[in-house]
Image (spheres, rainbow, N blue to C red):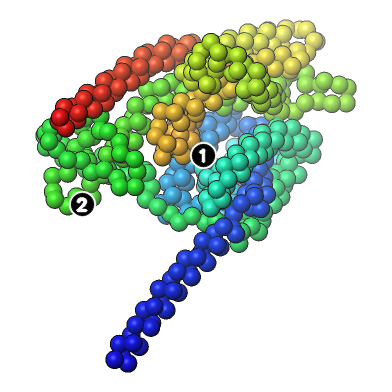
């Protein structure tokens, strides 16, 4: 009897102890996170954007002046670095969601960026790491010198790929145990405002320092800023809510493809059962891409390693937006082009006798255009347009994308005309210098293109994908940017090879007065025009697939009603 009582007491104590531990954990979670963590997280992201943007804003000039690269070679390096950054962002999102967690991913990314920027700064400080001192003679970089430069850029890219996809989501995690939507909205507002300010600082202050004080001081600034970014993030470590990693959506998609291929020979029957998720609202299985339905069919009493209907339908949603997604590749190549910087370098950039605008700072006009237009559109046009279009956002995302594509074509027409005038003036005996302010119209048009096309695509992706896949919308957009950078790399190298074939002067010559960058702009105009017609065709396909989807869902519901009767 005494032994039984002795056995019962520990059990009661264990239950009480578990209850107390759960209560303490919940209290700790509530005490952690919240607005007090925002200065650390936003400072980390803002400083990282300033540091990485400051390192890359003038990179084309650094590659040409210090590493003696041709314009095409330098542009190709920048295209590939940008493509690698966007591609690795998807890998960073996958690794953080399935293995490391967001806190570790951001911490590792911060250290990687800091190390890469330090290496890049060393290329400006140590003469042995560059081909020659600027102005002392022309020689090409050795493999070791070029390798050290690429390692530094690779580390910066890897760090940015870890921080970029995780920072916003990690900030949202801090309100996981605070049931106050207003706090989350405030966080997103401050987050986007800080990114805009960071871009302005990069395009003005950092670029100005690099032009006025040289590369040694110009690259030292990003190192110091990135050091502040890393320290700011680590100082708030004890305050963060660190969400445990779950099964990644990407791995679920891979599982669907593997199981669907494994079951490719089975035949779906009307009475088949399908594996539904217990923790989500039930989703109806559609006949769209019916081959994938074989992945979630249940033929055994106990389903094992069978994907859910929800995962299959999520994958179908991603596949469904691929045509419209692909139409966003070519317009992005206009943004990454470095030739406007080379144009501005040849033009009169003085707006006052004592003030000269850096060549890489003219991109700030695109950013200002986006900020002004988005504010005007959201506060003034949306309420007016909503009365006529019955769209809560004023214009449907597809309409906004189409307007953006048209603006990208107009921007290239304006750029080609301006470059023709500039080149003709430069190759005459006239002593008049063309003002670089003539580049502002094309930057404004590209900014409007960004406001319509880019934001419209983000809205479309968020509306087309299931709510549980909201984070995938950014990954989809980053993937299109990565492909666009690779296409830009192929396009510039192809144009350079074809036009310089048989000893001719390349359109994209480093001496843009001898080349024909205007012809290159006309080529971009033509391919973007073709891309616009392709987009219209994609919209037609997407509309047809939506109609079939609605028909399939209504048919399935009617069959269920008839079966119940």
- Residue 561 position (above or below residue 418): below
x then y, percent, for residue 6: 35, 88
Question: Do residues under tags 1 and 2 come within 8 Å of each other at their CB atoms?
Answer: no
Q: Residue at x 61, y 41 (%)?
A: 182
x then y, percent, for residue 401: 50, 18
In the rendering, which numbered label is found on residue 335? none
Q: Between residues 338 and 69, which one lies in front from this camera angle?
A: 338
Count neighbours of disc 1 (C-alpha within 10 A) and say few if under 14, some if 14 to 19, many if 20 or more.
Answer: many
x then y, percent, for residue 190: 66, 39
Left or right side of 330 for 343 = right
Element on which disc 1 rests: helix
Which residue position holds label 2? 304
Q: Residue at x 61, y 44 (%)?
A: 183
Q: Is residue 137 visible?
A: no
- Residue 90 position (above or below residue 448): below
Where the N terminus falls, by quadrant?
Answer: bottom left
Q: Between residues 508 and 252, which one lies in front from this camera angle?
A: 252
- Residue 92 position (above or below residue 537): below
Q: Between residues 69 and 161, which one lies in front from this camera angle?
A: 161
Element on which disc 2 rests: loop
In the rendering, which numbered label is found on residue 85? 1
Q: Residue at x 20, y 28 (%)?
A: 561
x then y, percent, for residue 360: 69, 28
Count neighbours of disc 2 (C-alpha within 10 A) and say few if under 14, some if 14 to 19, many if 20 or more.
Answer: few
Q: CA distance from mark 1 to mark 2?
A: 37 Å
Mark whose residue sits in front, 1 or 2: 2
**Could you tell which of marks 1 and 2 lies nearer the N-terminus?**
1
Which quarter of the figure has residue 269? top left
Which quarter of the figure has residue 65? top right
Q: Residue at x 76, y 44 (%)?
A: 217
Left or right side of 561 for 221 = right
């Amino acid at each position: 009897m005494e032994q039984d009582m002795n056995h019962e007491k520990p059990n009661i104590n264990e239950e009480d102890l578990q209850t107390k531990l759960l209560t303490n954990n919940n209290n700790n979670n509530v005490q952690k996170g919240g607005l007090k963590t925002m200065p650390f997280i936003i400072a980390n992201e803002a400083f990282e954007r300033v540091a990485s943007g400051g390192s890359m804003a003038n990179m084309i000039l650094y590659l040409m002046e210090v590493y003696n690269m041709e314009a095409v070679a330098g542009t190709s390096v920048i295209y590939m670095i940008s493509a690698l950054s966007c591609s690795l962002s998807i890998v960073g999102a996958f690794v953080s969601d399935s293995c490391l967690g967001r806190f570790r991913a951001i911490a590792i990314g911060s250290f990687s960026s800091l190390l890469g920027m330090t290496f890049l700064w060393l290329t400006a400080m140590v003469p042995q790491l560059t081909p020659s001192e600027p102005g002392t003679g022309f020689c090409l970089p050795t493999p070791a010198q070029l390798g050290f430069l690429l390692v530094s850029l690779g580390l910066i890219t890897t760090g940015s790929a870890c921080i970029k996809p995780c920072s916003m989501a990690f900030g949202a995690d801090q309100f996981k145990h605070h049931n106050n939507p207003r706090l989350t909205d405030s966080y997103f507002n401050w987050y986007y405002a800080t990114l805009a300010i960071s871009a302005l600082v990069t395009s003005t202050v950092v670029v100005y320092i690099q032009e006025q004080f040289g590369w040694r001081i110009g690259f030292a600034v990003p190192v110091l800023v990135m050091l502040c970014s890393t320290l700011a993030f680590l100082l708030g470590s004890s305050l963060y809510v660190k969400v445990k990693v779950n099964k990644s959506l990407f791995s679920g998609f891979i599982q669907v493809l593997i199981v669907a291929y494994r079951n490719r020979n089975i035949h779906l029957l009307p009475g088949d059962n399908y594996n539904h998720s217990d923790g989500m609202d039930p989703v109806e299985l559609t006949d769209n891409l019916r081959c994938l339905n074989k992945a979630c069919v249940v033929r055994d009493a106990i389903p094992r390693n069978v994907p859910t209907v929800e995962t299959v339908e999520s994958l179908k949603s991603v596949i469904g937006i691929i045509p419209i997604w692909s139409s966003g590749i070519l317009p992005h190549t206009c943004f990454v082009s470095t030739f406007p910087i080379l144009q501005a370098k040849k033009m009169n950039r003085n707006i006052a006798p004592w003030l000269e605008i850096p060549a890489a700072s003219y991109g700030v006009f695109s950013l200002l255009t986006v900020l002004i237009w988005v504010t005007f559109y959201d506060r003034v046009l949306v309420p007016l347009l909503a009365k006529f279009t019955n769209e809560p956002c004023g214009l449907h995302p597809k309409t906004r994308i189409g307007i953006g594509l048209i603006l990208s074509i107009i921007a290239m027409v304006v750029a080609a005309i301006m470059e023709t005038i500039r080149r003709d003036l430069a190759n005459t005996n006239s002593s008049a210098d063309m003002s670089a302010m003539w580049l502002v119209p094309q930057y404004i048009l590209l900014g409007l293109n960004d406001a319509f096309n880019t934001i419209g695509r983000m809205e479309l992706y968020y509306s087309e994908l299931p709510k549980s896949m909201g984070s995938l919308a950014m990954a989809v957009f980053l993937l299109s940017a990565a492909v666009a950078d690779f296409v830009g790399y192929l396009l510039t190298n192809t144009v350079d090879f074809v036009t310089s074939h048989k000893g001719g002067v390349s359109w994209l010559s480093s001496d843009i007065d001898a080349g024909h960058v205007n012809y290159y702009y006309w080529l971009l105009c033509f391919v973007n025009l073709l891309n616009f017609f392709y987009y219209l065709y994609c919209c037609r396909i997407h509309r047809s697939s939506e109609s079939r989807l609605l028909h399939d869902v209504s048919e399935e519901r009617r069959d269920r009603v008839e079966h119940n009767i």
